[in-house]
Image (cartoon, grey):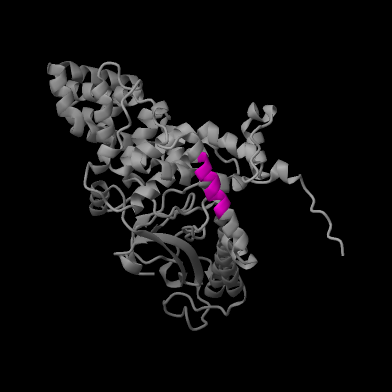
Amino acid sequence: MARSKPEGPAPEASGGILSLPRKRPAEAAAGGENEIVDACRRGEAWAMELVYHRYRRRVYALASRIAGAEDADEVAQEAFVRVLRGLPKFRGDAALGTWIYRLAVNAALTHVSRRPRRPAGDDAVDSIPAPGAGADARDPGLSARLERALAELPTGYRAVLVLHDIEGFSHEECAEIIGCRVGTSKSQLHKARARMREILGPQLAAERRR
Amino acid sequence: MGCREFEAIASRYVDNDLDAEVASAARGHLRDCCACRERADDEAEIAAAARALRTEDLTPGEGWDALWEGIRARVAEEERADAARPRWVRWWRSHGRRAAVATAAAAALVGLAFGSPRPLGGGPGAGAGGDDVVAGETVSERAERERLEAASWVREKLEDIRDISVRENDYLPDDHRRATAAERAALEREGAPAEEMVFLYQRQAAGVVLDGAFSGTRDGGGGGTRISAVRAGAEGEVHGYPLIEVDREGEAGEAGRPPDAFSLPRPRPPEPARARATARVPEGGGAW
C-alpha cells in the first residue's frame, strides 16, 4: 500500500532547527513580534534564529551579571533552549521580550541556586567583564568595582539591580520579569543599593575627599 | 524629615520617584544633614555607574555563532530524546500531570455529589439526624448547601488550574514570600534557599480535596515550609504563610515542572459554630 505523502510544508521550509536556512525572508526580518512567534510555532528555523539575534545581547548580559561571567555561556544557552522549546506554547500574555527575559532571569537564578556555594566574592573575580567603552567616563575603575560588588549581592537583589539600573527596565517591567509586585521590586532595589553602598561606600567617600 | 525616614526613601529620591512634597522634605533634610547627603551622593553615583555599564561589552567566550550552534545542538538533542520516548511518556510530560490533578478534582466532585451526607458539626442535636434550625435553615439543608458550595469550588479550581504556575527552585524576594524573620535572614545571607524541591500534595479536609504543590527544603523534609506555589487572587494561608502572588509564566513554563496547581477554598461567610464544616488547612507547619 502506497503511503500517502504527509501534508504540510516541505522540510526545507519548516524542517526545524536542523535544516536552518541561512537566508531569512526579508519581510519576516522586518516583521512584527506576532509574525515571528507564529513562524516559531510552525517550527521555522529562520524565526528561531531571528529571536536569538534580537535578544541575545540582553539575555547574555543578564546571564553574565546574575550568574557570573564564567557560567554565562551555559546559562544563556539554557535560557535560549527554554525559549525555543517553549515558544510554541507562548500565549502572548506578556510581550515576547518580557517573557524571554523572564526565562533568562529564571535560568540564571536556578543556575545560581543549584551550583555549589562559593566563598563570598569568589565569583566576583571571575565575573568582571573587561572594562571598556562602557565604563563610567569619570572613573573607569568604578565600573570594575561595581561589577565586583554586584557579584557579592544576594541573587535576588542582584537580579533587580541588574534589570533596573543596568538594563534600564522600569519597576513595572522588572516586576513582570521577576514575577513579583512593583512595590517588591522597588524595595529590593532599595536594599540592593544600600548593600552596594556598604560595599563601595568607603571607597566612594575617599575618592570624593581626594 | 529625619535620617531614618530619609534612609527609607533614599533610593526613590535618587530615582526622582517621590511625590513633590516628600521630595521637598527630603531636599530640606539634605541641606542640614551631611551624612544623608553623602548617602544620596553614593547612591546616585552607584546608579549612574550602573547605567553606564554597557551590555554590548559582554560577549560569549567562544563568540555568538558558537553559542548559537550550542543552542541548536541542545534543542536537536532534546527533540531527539522526545522522539525516542514512548508516546504515553510524551503525553504524560505535556498533559499528564495536569490531567492527574484534574482527574483527582473530578473524582472529588463526583464524591461530593454522590457521597453519603456527613454529619456536620459537633453541636447537640446536629449529628443524630436532628433537623435543628440554625440561621434559617435546617442542618440537612445546610449540609446540602455546603456540598453544593464545595462542588462549585472544585469546578472553579479546575478553571483556576489553567492560570497557575509553580516555579521550581525559585527565589522569591522576602516581601513576596512573607518568610519568617529567621528565613529572611537566611535568604539574605545565602542569597537563595538551597536544595529546594517541590512537593505535590493532595489532602482531603472536611470533604474537600485540596490539590497543589509547594516547595520545601530537603532539610525540612515533608514538613518543609517554603511556599512558592500560589494561586492568582488566592486568599488564605498554608502553614501560616499567606498566599499572595502568582507566577504567570503559565503554559510556557519549562518541561519537567510540577503540576500547576495550588488552591484553597474561598473563605466563606461566618457561620454558627455548631453546624460548620469548613475546609481548613492546619496551621503550625505540620507535614502534609
Q: Which residues are magenta?
A: B68-77
Taking depth in this image into account, of B107 and A70 the one nearest to the observer is A70
Question: For residue B23, what is the image quadrant?
Answer: top left
As drawn, B260 above or below A183? below
With B103 as the anchor, is B63 left or right in this view? left
Taking depth in this image into account, of B119 and B99 the one nearest to the observer is B99
Q: Residue at x 36, y 46 (%)?
A: B176
The quadrant of the rendering that contains the N terminus of chain A is: bottom right
Residue A179: x and y in percent read 44, 43
Taking depth in this image into account, of A176 and B18 the one nearest to the observer is A176
With A91 as the anchor, is B184 left or right in this view? left
Residue B50: x and y in percent read 32, 26
As drawn, B71 above or below A203? below
As drawn, B236 above or below A136? below
Q: Main secondary structure of the magenta part?
A: helix
Residue B65: x and y in percent read 51, 36
Q: Residue at x 24, y 24 (%)?
A: A141
Question: For residue A95, what is the image quadrant?
Answer: top right
Q: Residue at x 45, y 35 (%)?
A: B63
* Residue B73 part of the magenta segment: yes
Question: For residue A191, what is the image quadrant?
Answer: top left
Residue B238: x and y in percent read 38, 60
The quadrant of the rendering that contains the C terminus of chain A is: top left
With A185 as the anchor, is B190 left or right in this view? left
As drawn, A198 above or below B40? below
* Residue B164 part of the magenta segment: no
